[in-house]
Structure formats: C-alpha cells, structure tokens
C-alpha cells in the first residue's frame, strides 16, 4: 500500500443568478474570466508575514442546515448543500486554480505536469488559488480507501478554514521553519493518493470546523483526522460529478516558482494579473453552484 508522508501539517491558511455557462464557451473565455478577477497590482509594501483577518461569518457548528437557507441541488440529485447567499449580489461561478510544484535538486519549487507519475523520494507541494472568498476542505483517500479530512486541522488556526479570493495557499505550508516540513514525500509501495479539494461559499453542513473541531479532537484524539459520515461524504462525491469547465495552463513545466508567487503565499496577498497562471483552472458551469469539488490523483509508481 502506498504511503505519502505528510511532512507538514496542512496549513491553508449562492449567487442569485441561475445562468448556466454555455457549452460553447471557449477555454480562453474561462481562463480570461479567472485571471481578470485577480487584482491589477499587488500591494507594493506587503507585510513581513502572512496576516489573517477574522472570518466574516457566523460559525455553523450544527449538523443541520441553517434555518431560512435556500438549497441548491447538485447534479440534479436529491442531495443539497446549504446556500445562504441568495440575498447577496450576483457572484461569479466558483473556480479553483491549482499548480503542483516539485522540489528539484537545488531545493527550488518547479512546476510539474499534474498528470505525471511520482516515484519514491519525490517531494511535492500543491498551490491552490480560489477566485472567491469562502471555505476550503481537503479530504484524503488512499487506493479508494475510506476518506479522512486533513484540512481544516484542529491543531492549526483554531480549526478554521476560510479562504480569500486569489490568495494562494500551499499544501504543505511554505512557512514551516524546517525546510523538510514544506513538502509531501512519496515512499513505499506504488498506489494512488487522491485528494478532494472542496471550495464552498458557505460552511459545509455536518462537517466540524473551528471550535467544534478543536473540542472534538481534544476529546477524541484517536478519531482525528476526522472521518466524514456516509451521508456527508456522499454529498462531496456527488458534487464532484457536477459540470465544470477545465482549462490547462500555457506555462511550461519546469518553470521555477516566481518570487511574486512565493510572496503572495507567505504574506497572504492576492496574486495580481501579471503573475503566472495556475497549471489547471476548474470553473463550475453553474454560476449559482455553492460548491466546487476538485479531485487530484497523485500517482505513485
């Protein structure tokens, strides 16, 4: 069975419209919509370290759907996520850009093809760039085994998992003091490590975060990482089948991570329009979809 050493604790740091993206929408239109929503310029005087502001939400620790919340069906199935954005201004379709970086012989982070096969000793990091403010969850399965939630983590930032538009987050974190803790490393037998990256506008129902997650893991250390129940996991899997548009980058594999990308990640700044584009951009076809699920298969040979 394959083993992926998690050398660093994962640190990461509905709209009213019902318009569906046209099936004829070109890759350039999807790419343009994502990149044009980045800020035009990055702060010229960034803080020395990443700063995080309090999440702008009321913590949903209940297992039930919030009262008076609308629901949006996923993939025409009778399972729904809470959508409390119906009274807000129209919002863009949720999109996620991601890039896989691998540590080269000189210790640099260089882009690699997301579909490549990895081998014992390879060290990688995944950079995530959402286009909306919201929340992110990362679930891990190994060789189609049972899932476990590796982010949010009760040991980090009080178990919170909110994200900001175009502020990249790295898995594992690049701000760990020990350089060895900044990478995933492959070892052991061959297999497939699968990550489900879930980006939502509002917190997922029935998934503990914040103080609820901290309290649960404090009292149940043997049950953390938290394992989602069958019903909650069914929603994630169903949402992963929703229609999306996928475009790949024109940036060549082998390109080193730029200083601008490094600064944006470590200091909590939004990537501007001059920064390299992600290797892959996935955008929900429905502008009112409250969740986007991205599956990353890390093939270990």
Image (tube, rainbow, N blue to C red):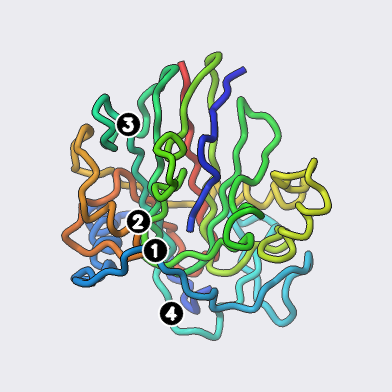
Q: Is residue 278 above or below residue 72?
A: above
Q: Residue 105: which quarter of the image?
A: top left
Using the numbered discs, state the Cα–Cα distance from disc 2 to disc 3 in whole angstroms: 17 Å
Please, what secondary structure does the residue beneath circle 2 have?
Answer: helix
Task: Return the disc, 3 or 1, that comes first in the chain's sequence.
Answer: 1
Tell me what residue is drawn at x 49 percent, y 55 percent: 12
Q: Which residue is mark 2?
A: 265
4 and 3 marks in contact (CB < 8 Å)? no
Q: Nearer the viewer, mark 1 or mark 4?
A: 1
Q: Residue furthest front?
A: 177
1 and 2 marks in contact (CB < 8 Å)? yes
Estimate the x, y position of residue 227 in percent, counting from the top left. Answer: 73, 44
Estimate the x, y position of residue 32 in percent, counting from the top left. Answer: 23, 60
Say few, some or many: other residues with alpha carbon within 10 Å of mark 3 (under 14 / 14 to 19 / 20 or more).
many
Tell me what residue is drawn at x 61 percent, y 57 percent: 76
Foreground of the two, 248 or 265: 265
Task: Return the disc, 2 or 3, that comes first in the chain's sequence.
Answer: 3
In the picture, measured across the screen, residue 223 lies left or right of residue 156, that is right
Using the numbered discs, state the Cα–Cα distance from disc 1 to disc 2 in whole angstroms: 8 Å
Q: Which residue is mark 3?
A: 103
Q: Which residue is mark 4?
A: 90
Please, what secondary structure does the residue beneath circle 1 have?
Answer: loop
Q: Which mark is residue 50?
A: 1
Task: Return the disc, 4 or 2, that comes first in the chain's sequence.
Answer: 4
Using the numbered discs, state the Cα–Cα distance from disc 3 to disc 1 in whole angstroms: 23 Å
Q: Nearer the viewer, mark 4 or mark 3?
A: 3
Quarter of the rendering occupied by the N terminus? top right
Tell me what residue is drawn at x 47 percent, y 21 percent: 300
Task: Return the disc, 1 or 2, that comes first in the chain's sequence.
Answer: 1
Please, what secondary structure does the residue beneath circle 3 have?
Answer: strand
């Amino acid at each position: 069975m394959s083993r992926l050493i998690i050398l660093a604790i994962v640190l990461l740091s509905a709209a009213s419209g019902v318009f569906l993206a046209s099936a004829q929408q070109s890759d350039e239109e999807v790419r343009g919509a994502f990149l044009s929503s980045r800020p035009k310029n990055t702060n010229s005087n960034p803080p020395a370290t990443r700063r995080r502001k309090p999440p702008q939400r009321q913590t949903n620790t209940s297992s039930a759907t919030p009262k008076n919340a609308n629901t949006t069906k996923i993939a025409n199935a009778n399972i729904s996520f809470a959508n409390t954005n119906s009274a807000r201004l129209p919002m863009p379709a949720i999109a996620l850009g991601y890039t896989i970086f691998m540590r080269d012989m000189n210790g640099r982070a260089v882009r690699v093809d997301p579909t490549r096969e990895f081998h014992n000793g390879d060290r990688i990091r995944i950079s995530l760039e959402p286009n909306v403010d919201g929340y992110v969850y990362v679930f891990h399965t190994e060789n189609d085994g049972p899932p476990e939630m590796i982010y949010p983590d009760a040991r980090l930032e009080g178990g919170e998992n909110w994200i900001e538009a175009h502020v990249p987050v790295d898995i594992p974190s690049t701000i760990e003091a020990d350089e060895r803790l900044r990478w995933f490393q492959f070892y052991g037998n061959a297999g497939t490590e699968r990550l489900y990256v879930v980006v939502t506008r509002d917190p997922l129902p029935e998934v503990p975060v914040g103080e609820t997650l901290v309290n649960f893991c404090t009292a149940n250390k043997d049950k953390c990482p938290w394992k989602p129940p069958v019903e909650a996991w069914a929603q994630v899997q169903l949402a992963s089948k929703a229609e999306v548009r996928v475009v790949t980058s024109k940036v060549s594999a082998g390109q080193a991570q730029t200083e601008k990308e490094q600064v944006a990640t470590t200091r909590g700044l939004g990537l501007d329009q001059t920064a390299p584009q992600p290797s892959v951009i996935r955008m929900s076809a429905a502008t009112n979809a409250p969740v986007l699920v991205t599956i990353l298969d890390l093939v270990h040979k």
